[in-house]
Amino acid sequence: MFEIHLGVPEMEELWFRLEKKHRDGSASKAEEKLRRQMGKAMALIASNPRHPGLHSHEITSLTARYGLKVWESYLENNTPRAGRIFWCYGPDQGSITIIGLEPHPEDKANSYKKITLSSMGQEV
């Protein structure tokens, strides 16, 4: 099992906002769907980052830009602009940090140039 961390400030803020809205019943259907997808993906990544359902693979252009291996896993598949979750190993051995969440890029040529990732952050 890997310990999951959230990148700061974006991933940490997103997750805690979704959790708060879920608890107080103010989440929209889209927010509930995203919370479920993120939660499921984080649980699968924690137990097995290479789980077949995640379709995890390194994004070499992001690895080159950020100077550490950046991985992409599926939140969903076979849907337009399907969600993707970005993560890296660390900051410590046995931990993984969720550093981004984006829809699948439509522009293949410039697909990852617009993606900005969070910094390493807090434990979930």
Image: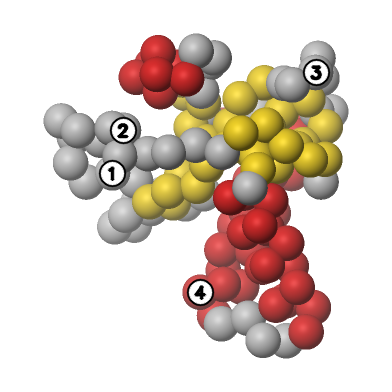
Tell me the quadrant of the picture where the N terminus can be found: top right
Q: Which residue is under mark 2?
A: 112
Q: Position of residue 64 (x, y in %)?
A: 40, 13
Instruction: Relative to 82, say whether 70 is above or below.
Output: above
Residue nearer the viewer, 95 or 57:
95
Picture mark count = 4
Name the secondary structure under disc 3: loop
Residue nearer the viewer, 69 or 45:
69
Q: Label 4, label 1: how many angstroms apart (C-alpha)?
A: 19 Å
Q: Hey, which quadrant is residue 51 in on the image?
A: top right
Q: Which residue is under mark 3?
A: 92
Q: Is residue 107 found left or right of 123 in the rendered image?
A: left
Q: Which residue is under mark 4?
A: 30
* Contact between labelled residues 2 and 1, with CB atoms less than 8 Å apart: yes
N-terminal of the pair, mark 3 or mark 4, is 4
N-terminal of the pair, mark 1 or mark 2, is 1
Instruction: Relative to 88, say whether 79 is above or below.
Output: below
Name the mark nearer the viewer: 3 or 4.
Answer: 3
N-terminal of the pair, mark 3 or mark 2, is 3
Name the secondary structure under disc 4: helix
Name the secondary structure under disc 1: loop
Q: Residue at x 79, y 78 (%)?
A: 23
Q: Label 3, label 4: how many angstroms apart (C-alpha)?
A: 33 Å
Q: Hey, which quadrant is residue 15 in on the image?
A: bottom right
Q: Position of residue 92 (x, y in %)?
A: 80, 18
Q: Amino acid at mark 3?
A: Asp
Q: Label 1, label 3: how many angstroms apart (C-alpha)?
A: 30 Å
N-terminal of the pair, mark 1 or mark 3, is 3
